[in-house]
Amino acid sequence: MFFSRDFLKLQVVCLKMLFRKSTRKRFVFLVFTFLFMLGFNTCSYLMKFHKTETLKREVLAEKAFKVFFTRMRSTNDFERFLFNHRRPLQDLGANIVQKAFIYQNNLYIHFLSPFGLETGQSIDEIEAMQLLYHMFNLSRAVAEFYVADHVDGYRSRVKNQYVDYNGNRLDEDTVRNRHDTLKADLGDIADMIRSLSRDKRKDVIHSVRNTMVENLKRIAGSKDDDPNLYLSRVEIIVPMNFLHIWSHIQQDNTTDIMDLLYSVSSNPEGSIETDSAFLKVPEIYAGEALYKDMDIYPRYAPIYVPDLLKPHWNWLLFQNIRLKKDFMDYLNQLHFNGHYLFSYEKSQILQDKVKNLNDDIQTNHIHFYLTDVSMGIAFPFMISLFAFIHLKTEIAFLLMYKNRVREILFIFWLLPLSLMFLVKSGILTGYFFYLHSSGGGLALLLPLLASFVAVAAGFYPINKWCFNQFFGDTLNLYALHKGR
């Protein structure tokens, strides 16, 4: 039986024959040369794999590649866009985010309450909002926006501030001008909402607007988180909840005017206190885009596509990036038809990055397979041929006493494969120990394993052919022993 005590002794005998004095230098040189080539090829594959895997993780983790802002030319155009494109986009796995838009290069986005004030939120909508928060480094600002909830049972206290997204490196005059411009824009927006009122609510909205706008505070973006280069055109991020307050006051027909006047109060520490319901999305916009019926209609509306990029297994046993080409074609068609993208170059960069990265990954694996399999078969073939040419006398002498042809054949099949396995496993262990981070283990092991299995299967008949004179019906061990 294989791997018995006699078989192990036979392996030792074969190794001694290979390293006999007359052939030692040639055999060692042969083994060292091929193992060095195999090790170099494996190491080159691992380094390229590590590089492409790192780039692939960066592309997949880039949240800006999951949201595209499309331009609207007018209010009516936006209404038509919602009507015509909502269903096709949903069929492509995308959704129009209805609680955020870009107006005057400022992002107006609804701040979700951590206290559960929101109702009727779908999972996709919540995921889209959370993604936007992460994209613009807003997670902390949103969490700190609600200072206290249920003050006196039905009121909430929020910070009266906005986020200066890319203003960290601007001079003081530019920051001051942007602050004044934003206050003027908010005043205009409040006046648009106010113009829809027909009674004394106009005065209430005017008073509340002055209270909020005049005490508006600027919060600089985090110095540790530079603005995303794909989104750096966004200047200021404003909580859309401020607009909700004015809209609720304009629509409220059940509350006394005096009560409405005191429904919003400003606190010295830079916060405002208002009815909790006023911070929610107004009912007239439930399930629809916000403020689409005014001149502040979304100049750019976000389209959220969560599964645009995904890891994808190729039949060559490597993992590349799958890009939803149908969605990208649809997006390019929107751009061609006049719905220009807020950052059109982002879509082109994305497609180029994915194509180049997938090409690099495929080239690396094809080169590895071709080189590794060819060298993997050539190396054991040279050892078997070397053993037959230089050791057939000793092997024939050994077979005169013990008919162990199959065992000897198996030894010379197993020996080079074991050397290759040791070299590759050693390099692989070094990679996992020094370079490998989380993920990618299976994608790395499968090509190595497939190549090794292919070499082992391909070398078996070649090894048998090298020792074909020891098989057959007429076997003259004496002639082989004499070197004939």
Image (cartoon, grey):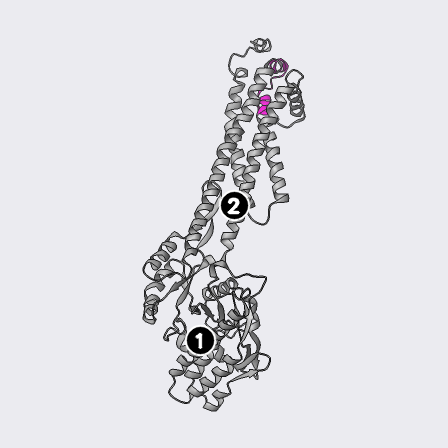
Q: Is residue 256 visible?
A: no
350 part of magenta stretch: no
Predominant SS along the magenta part: helix
Considering only vertical position in the picture, is 415 above or below 146? above
Considering only vertical position in the picture, is 95 above or below 388? below
Q: Position of residue 11 (x, y in %)?
A: 65, 24
**Residue 144 position by quadrant:** bottom right
Q: Position of residue 386 (x, y in %)?
A: 57, 19
Q: Amino acid at mark 1?
A: Asp
Q: Position of residue 352 (x, y in %)?
A: 43, 49
Considering only vertical position in the picture, is 217 above or below 86? below
Q: Residues within 10 Å of mark 2 (few under 14, many from 20)?
A: some
Name the front one of labels 2 and 1: 1
Label 2: state its secondary structure: helix
Q: Position of residue 424 (x, y in %)?
A: 59, 35
Q: Are marks 2 and 1 in contact (CB under 8 Å)?
A: no
Q: Looking at the rendering, in which quadrant would you find the C terminus?
A: top right
Residue at image position (53%, 46%) is 53
Nearest the camera: 420 or 41? 41
411 part of magenta stretch: yes
Mark 1 lies on residue = 185
- The residues tagged by marks 2 and 1 sit, at their Cα atoms, a distance apart of 46 Å
Q: Is residue 384 visible?
A: yes
| Of pointers 2 and 1, the one earlier in the residue sequence | 2
Residue at image position (53%, 15%) is 469
Mark 2 lies on residue = 52
Considering only vertical position in the picture, is 35 above or below 302? above
* Residue 385 left/right relative to 15: left
* Residue 391 left/right relative to 373: right
**Residue 70 position by quadrant:** bottom left
From which residue to which does the magenta span run? 395-412
Nearest the camera: 170 or 160? 170
